[in-house]
Image: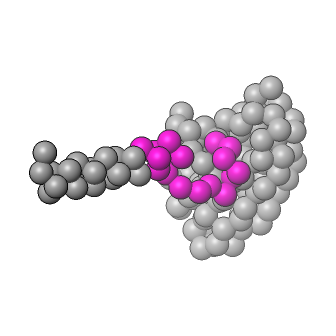
């Protein structure tokens, strides 16, 4: 085997090892401490973001699944002013038109809860906390 061929094979092996390492590590850092949330059936890391346009959730009601003890991190970005209310946990936060609010709390209560634009009675998310 020639030196050029050995070098080429070595470069390919190193590149493959780097790609494998990145894939096994999840592709990067997460602000959720490695925890994942199920958003509309898909596991994602970090903060779940819900977008509201014209007083309605973009893409329909977002379904979020956590395990008791996880950290719930939800950001709501809205083009309308309203109170975003997380029922069951009884937490409400005012969002300005064109603004956002963030919910960051422990998943301490098991069950299924609605998140809605309170004055519009518009459900934007369903939050499930499993045991």
Can you tell which quarter of the image residue 47 is in? bottom right
81 inside magenta stretch: no
| Bounds of the magenta segment | 19-36
On the picture, is 31 further left or further right than 57?
right
Give the residue drawn at x 50%, y 42%. Answer: 24
Report if residue 88 is visible in the image. Answer: no
Q: Magenta region, mostly helix, strand or loop?
A: loop
- Residue at 77 percent across and 66 percent down: it is 94
Q: Looking at this rendering, what residue extends furthest in the top direction?
A: 131
Image quarter (top left, top right, bottom left or bottom right) of the N terminus = top left
State whether residue 54 is above or below residue 38. Answer: below
Q: Nearer the viewer, residue 43 or 30?
A: 30
In terms of depth relative to the viewer, which is nearer, 17 or 71? 17
Q: Is residue 30 visible?
A: yes
- Of 131 and 6, the residue lying toward us: 6
Q: Residue 62 lies in what quarter of the image?
A: top right
Asked whether, in this view, residue 74 is left or right of residue 6, the answer is: right
Q: Is residue 22 magenta?
A: yes
Residue 105 % position (x, y): 82, 51
Image height of 100 relative to 125, above or below: below
- Considering the image in quadrants, where does the C terminus appear? top right
- Residue at the spot 69% in from the left edge and 72% down from the top edge: 96
Residue 43 drawn at (x, y percent) = 56, 39
Percent coordinates x, y for residue 3 in the rendering: 16, 55
Rendered residue at 75%/48% (across/down): 72
Residue 112: % across, % down: 75, 32
């Amino acid at each position: 085997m020639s030196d050029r061929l050995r070098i080429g094979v070595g470069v390919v092996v190193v590149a493959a090892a780097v790609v494998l390492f990145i894939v096994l590590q999840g592709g990067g850092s997460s602000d959720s401490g490695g925890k994942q949330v199920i958003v509309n059936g898909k596991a994602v890391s970090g903060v779940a973001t819900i977008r509201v346009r014209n007083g309605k959730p973009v893409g329909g009601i977002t379904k979020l699944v956590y395990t008791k003890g996880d950290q719930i991190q939800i950001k709501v970005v809205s083009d309308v002013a309203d109170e975003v209310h997380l029922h069951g946990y009884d937490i409400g936060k005012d969002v300005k038109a064109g603004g956002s609010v963030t919910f960051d709390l422990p998943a301490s209560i098991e069950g299924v809860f609605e998140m809605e634009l309170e004055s519009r009675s518009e459900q934007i998310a369903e939050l499930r906390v499993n045991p």
